[in-house]
Amino acid sequence: EQVASGLPLVEALRRTAGRLEGSHAILAMSAAEPGVIAGARLGNAGGIVLGYGEGEMFLASDLAALLPHTRTVAFLADGQLVRVTPGSADGVGLDGEAFDLDARETTAGAEVAAKGEYPTYMLKEIMEQPEALADTIRSLVSFEPPSLHLNHLGAAHDRLGAVERVIVFGMGTSLHAGMLGARYFEALARVPAAAENASEFKYREPVLDRHTLVVSVSQSGESVDVIEAMAVAKAAGALTITISNTEGAQTTRVADGTVYTRAGQERGVASTKCFLTAVVALYVLALELGRSRGTLSEASLAGYIGALARLPAAVGGALGTAAQCREIAVRFGARRDFLFLGRGLAFPVAMEGALKLKEISYIHAEGYAAGEMKHGPIALIDEAFPTVAIATKHALRSKMISNIQQVQARNGPVIAVVTAGAGEDDLPDADVIAVPEVAELLEPLVATVPLQLLAYAIAELRGCDVDHPRNLAKTVTVE
């Protein structure tokens, strides 16, 4: 169109964009305007992030690509275009009206992208989890006096008292965080809650109203399925809050309120520290909902807040199982299949452990609710099929012990994650990994750590590229 009409590049792109359907991220250049790039974001897929340098500008699909070059960024929203030269950037809407780009300093600096002493980003990020948790907890609560600080909820805060139902959605690891979040909302706010896959939620015509709280979980804030599911929720009048690790991302622009995690930039494709910090954010949001609905007394609220104080150190203690996890990996890393079992709050942990193993080692693994075992999966058990069982102190332990014994009766090898000092010796024929004790609702975070370490060790022994697993991307921006 530019060649035919002699239009400026950004105007030609604007007119072209107005004819397109669906979701697109487009960059355009023209020989007629050297040194100019025009970009357009249409729909929810294909994010565009603008980076501001000194005498240079950058355009990328994800914040991580810009961090080695700049910390000053702006995110394009649906229907926005930008004209970029080496020294400037100008925004224009599909209607032709100019707008000011919302440039800001991101809290994720280039230094967090470096591996430092670690051979991979993933291992670095696993080992950073105590610090990431401490930073997130400090940003959301105070211990003296016990109080909550959800400073980015905005107008959503005033509507929490009227919430009668909660739906949490995400994809992959974020969905597993959401499964734990749903349990927190029921336990702490005493409101019906469920977790759903965002890609299914958006197509099933969900029944929603203004008394429904919809919580999305997306570390990047740019996952297309999550963004489109949020659009469905907002169209139905639901209250929307997002959990995000990326300031200014699309989900934070769409939602009525945001709870930010402070994990720092996560470069490994398989999420680790963003999972744990998202679970903490959901826990704190559930506390706020319980306080707003009057289901938590001040004394109870103080107890739940206080339980967070020990969590970073406990996760640090769980990291101390790395050598043991590697030894187990040496013996089981050549197996082709794994079963992960958990009950109650440990079920999402089993799902996450299986996903980590699949993502980075390419071993087939399934996460199951342990009560389902006798309804099918037990037929697979034999001496070549390891089972990883989460049997921590509060994870319906007596029933988990029974499940483990059923596996062992069929000659299945068992790797059990237990709480230190809580029956470590009652599984004599299992490989037992002991983690520090924490409050019941926080057990899943500590139990997840050895599963990350086990998956990492197996993948490393198999020669897999843990930072860039085949066929996977950090941020999924297309269906």
Image (cartoon, rainbow, N blue to C red):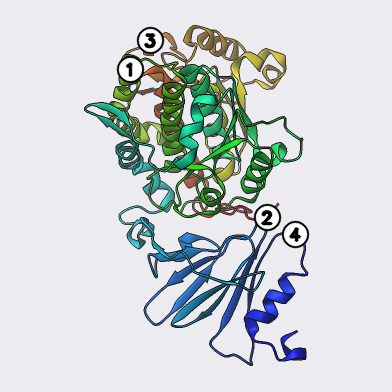
- C-beta proximity under 8 Å, tags 4 and 1: no
Label 2 packing within 10 angstroms: few (<14), some (14-19), many (20+): some
Numbered label attached to residue 478 = 2
What is the x, y in percent for residue 232?
69, 42
For mark 4, give the secondary structure: loop
What's under tag 1, amino acid-wise?
A: Glu
What residue type is disc 3 on? Gly
Q: Which one is closest to the eye, mark 2 or mark 3?
A: 2
What distance separates the C-alpha of mark 3 from that of mark 1?
Answer: 34 Å
Is 243 situated left or right of 338 in this image? Answer: left
Q: Are marks 4 and 2 in contact (CB under 8 Å)?
A: no
Distance (Cα) linking label 3 and label 4: 56 Å
SS for dot 3: loop
Is residue 373 in view from this perspective?
A: yes
In the rendered image, the quadrant that contains the N terminus is: bottom right
Compared across the picture, whether 277 is left or right of 76 comes to left
Residue at x-position 42% and y-position 8%: 426
Q: Earlier in the sequence, mark 4 or mark 1?
A: 4
Question: Badge 1 is on which residue?
Answer: 298
Instruction: Give the CA distance from mark 4 to mark 2.
Output: 10 Å
Q: Nearer the viewer, residue 266 or 141?
A: 141
Look at the image and tell me whether residue 334 can be seen.
Answer: no
Q: First in sequence: mark 2 or mark 1?
A: 1
Q: Marks 2 and 1, how far apart in space?
A: 45 Å
**Label 4 CA crowd tier, 10 Å (few <14, some 14–19, many 20+):** few
Q: Which residue is mark 3?
A: 423
